[in-house]
Every structure is written in structure tokens, then in C-alpha cells.
Image: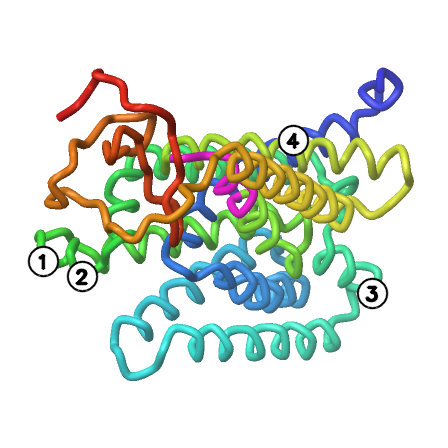
Amino acid sequence: MTEMLDLAFMRQALLAALLAGIAAPLVGTFLVQRRMSLIGDGMGHVALAGVAVGILTGQQPVFTALLAAVAAGVAIELIRASGRTSGDVALAVMFYGGIALGVVLIAKSTATSPANLTAYLFGAILTTSSGDLLVLAVLAVVVLVTTVLLRPRFFAVANDEEYARAAGMPVMAYNLVLAVLTAVTVVVSMRVVGLLLISALMIIPNATAQLLARSFAASVRWAVLLGVLCSVGGVVVSYQAETPSGGTIVLLAIAAFLVVNLGATVVARLRRAAHARAERHDHEHGPVCGHAAVEHGDHVDYLHDGHRHAAHEEHYDEHGEHEEVGTR
């Protein structure tokens, strides 16, 4: 580890991974909430066309990729808002159009090679220069500050767009800001995991966080923590194992999801086994059933024939003998 930190390019790679690990899951939280998990993929494909334009014209590919991704994000939102084309169709057009244009333009360039194309598609974090790192840091700070400041509004729009519109919120404006932030995140993560794997860093830590957290705020914190651990951990593992950093980061994120999912399943089964099922219970309990209700942890028991019964899935659990506490 000490040897790795002595290398300047590895320190830059770890910092780039840290920035991507914070920004990608943070923005991805709202994409998951809006059921638009694949929008990062669509923008990544269009960003490839932007990279190709940069290579072909001799410009900085980061900036041309950023312009292309922002344009794609805004276009997707405008098409979706028009109601004439569904969001998934707009995404599909971006998917195929972006990568087709990128491949055609790169083929016309004499300044690149298949190795360069692979680096953009799957990430080449070890080639991150100090100039790239400065640009990525500025973009990541923009994403972090904007997301934190607008988090309640993004949540309201993502959770119930119709209600937010009825409440007078400028839904379209917030959707466009989120689309631009997603485009910026795609470019921030481009060097770390590659354009084809960006969506994984946005979505998988959020999927894992939802298994661990019981509230939206806790889910965001878990997603960012997991994103940072997987990104930085993936770079360390890729250095030790001599594997591509992008693929290693994504595999680490998937491994974390599988472990947490397995753990959550085991815990749920243990909890179900710890509950004694009422032998026979045809009576249906509720606020107007006529039986006393008792607060019990995060649920309500009902007193019936000297026993406390709690609804669980399609049956009732036995929670013990009657106790004269907490009745309402």
C-alpha cells in the first residue's frame, strides 16, 4: 500500500476514484427514484461521440464529451416532457445514435487507436493526468453542492411528479438540472469506470443501500459510502491484481450487493422464524375491530382472548400474553 501511494499516478487515480465514488451514487439516487436507471448509459454512449469530436478536432475530449452529454440529457427531458415519445424510446435513440456516431467519427481520426477507444469505453484511471484531475474535481464539487442544496426538491419531484407540479414546483426546471448533473457525473466517471460502465456506479451502490437503509436520507448516505469504498477499493485491487480498474470497481460493487442481499435475506428469515404464528385466527384486526391496540416496536398488536396478535403478511403472529401497557 505504501509503495502504491509513493507513485504519483496512483495518488491521482485514487483521488479520481474518490470523486467519482461520491458523485455517481449521489446523482444515481434520484435516477433510481424516478425509475430512469439507464439514463446514465444513454448519456455515456452520447459522450463517446463527444470524445470522438474532441479527438477529431484536437480539442480536450473531456469538454466535448461534457457538451455532448449535457445536450443528450436536455434532449431526453424535452422529448419525455412533450409526451409524444416515451422516455425509454428517447433513451434507445440516444443509445444507438451516440455510439454509432462515436464509432464513425473515431474511425475517421488518425490521432487515436483501438487502445484509446477501449480506454474511454471501459476506463483507464491510471492515465488520469493532473489537468484531468483538476477538471474532475471542479465538476464533482458542482455536482455535490448542487445536489445537496436541491435534495428536498429533487426528492419531491422524483417521488411524485404530478403532485409536485400541482403544488406549483417548477418540475421541468428541476428535471433539466438533474439531467445536466447526470451528464456532468458521466464525464466525471469517464476516466474511472468508462462510458459503458458508468451506469453501474450510479445504480448498484443505490440498490445495495436500499437493502441497508430504512429512510431516503440514510439510503443516500449508504450509497455514497458504498460508492467511495467500491471505487477506491477497486483501484487498489486492480493495482494489486493487475486488472482493468473499471471492471474491477463494478465487480466489487456487484459483490457488495450480493453479500448484502444474502445477509438481508438471512436476517428476514430469522425474524420470521422468531415469530410464533397464531394457531388459527379468522378474525381480521384493524382500527375498528373492537379490540385494544398496543404499540409494539415498529408495529401494532391487538389484544384478543388474552393474547397479543400482530398482522404479518397473510397471517397473524402470536406476540405473547396480554400486558396492561401502552394500550390506546
Residue ID at (26%, 71%): 81
Quadrant in the picture for the N terminus? top right
Q: Which residues are magenta?
A: 206-214
| Residue at (22, 16) in percent of width and height | 325
Residues at marks 2 and 1, CA–CA distance in whole angstroms: 6 Å
CB atoms of marks 2 and 1 within 8 Å? yes
Q: Is residue 307 left or right of residue 253?
A: left
> For the residues marked 4 and 1, what is the alpha-carbon distance in whole angstroms?
40 Å
Q: Main secondary structure of the magenta part?
A: helix
Q: Earlier in the sequence, mark 3 or mark 1?
A: 3
Q: Which label was assigned to residue 55?
A: none
Residue 134 in view: no
Q: Which residue is mark 1?
A: 166
The amino acid type found where label 3 is placed reads Ser
Question: Where does the image place residue 287, in percent across and percent down from the top left?
Answer: 14, 42
* Earlier residue among tags 4 and 2: 2
* Mark sitting on residue 113: 3
Q: Position of residue 219 (x, y in %)?
A: 44, 36
Residue 324 located within the stretch drawn in magenta: no
> Residue drawn at (47%, 73%), measured in percent from left and top?
91
The nearer-to-camera label among 2 and 3 is 2
Residue occupied by mark 2: 162
Amino acid type, residue under disc 2 in the picture: Glu
For the residues marked 4 and 2, what is the alpha-carbon distance in whole angstroms? 36 Å
